[in-house]
Amino acid sequence: RDGISSGCGNNNFCPENSVTRAEMAIFLLKSKYGGNYYAQSSPITFSDTSTHWARYWIEKLKADGISYGCGNNNYCPESLVRRDEMAVFLVNTFRLK
């Protein structure tokens, strides 16, 4: 409704599906900046995202200090988000300044 997620296709939300780290980047940034937000082109710093469809979203997540990847200069965009990672993502996205 507010543009944070368009679901999983065919007008479905698929609440039982898992979420990847790439998808989570988009959810978090749209939650923070609004449903119409779109990540702008930026230099790619992670070794495993140079051609990934969500590379600019992932870089914005890093630039905002929300996530610094999964180690060894990688982001692991297709890995599923664990509950402990989700907690850190949420705290970092909405922390008071």
Image: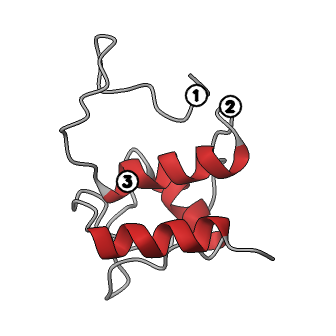
- Residue type at mark 2? Asn
Furthest-bottom residue in this view: 72
Q: Position of residue 56 (x, y in %)?
A: 54, 53
Q: Quadrant of the C terminus?
A: bottom right
Q: State the separation of the CA atoms marked 3 and 1.
A: 17 Å
Please give the label number shown on residue 31: none
> Which of the image's four quarters has the N terminus?
top right
Query: Toward which corner of the image does residue 34 lie, by quadrant?
Result: top right
Disc 3 + disc 1, Cβ < 8 Å: no
Residue at 64% in and 33% down: 35
- Label 1 is placed on what type of residue? Gly
Which label belongs to residue 3? 1
Is disc 2 in contact with disc 1, using a CB cutoff of under 8 Å?
yes
Left or right, 67 with respect to 75, comes to: right
Vertical comparison of 53 with 93: above or below: above
Q: Quadrant of residue 46?
A: bottom left
- Kindly tell me whether residue 40 is visible in this rendering: yes
Foreground mark, 2 or 1? 1
Location of residue 57 with respect to 73 vertically, above or below: above
34 or 87, which is in the foreground? 87
Tag 3 secondary structure: helix
**C-alpha separation, residue under disc 2 versus residue under disc 1:** 7 Å
Q: 83 or 72: which is nearer to us?
A: 83
Packing grade of label 3 (10 A; few <14, some 14-19, many >=20) is: many
Q: Which mark is on residue 22?
A: 3
Instruction: Give the class, few, some or many, for how many residues have Cα within 10 Å of label 1's Cα (few <14, many ≥20).
Output: few
Q: Is residue 43 visible?
A: no
What is the number of the mark on residue 36?
2
Q: Residues within 10 Å of mark 2 (few under 14, many from 20)?
A: few
Q: Residue at x 28, y 62 (%)?
A: 81
- Secondary structure of the residue carrying tag 2 is loop
Between marks 3 and 2, how big is the CA–CA gap? 18 Å
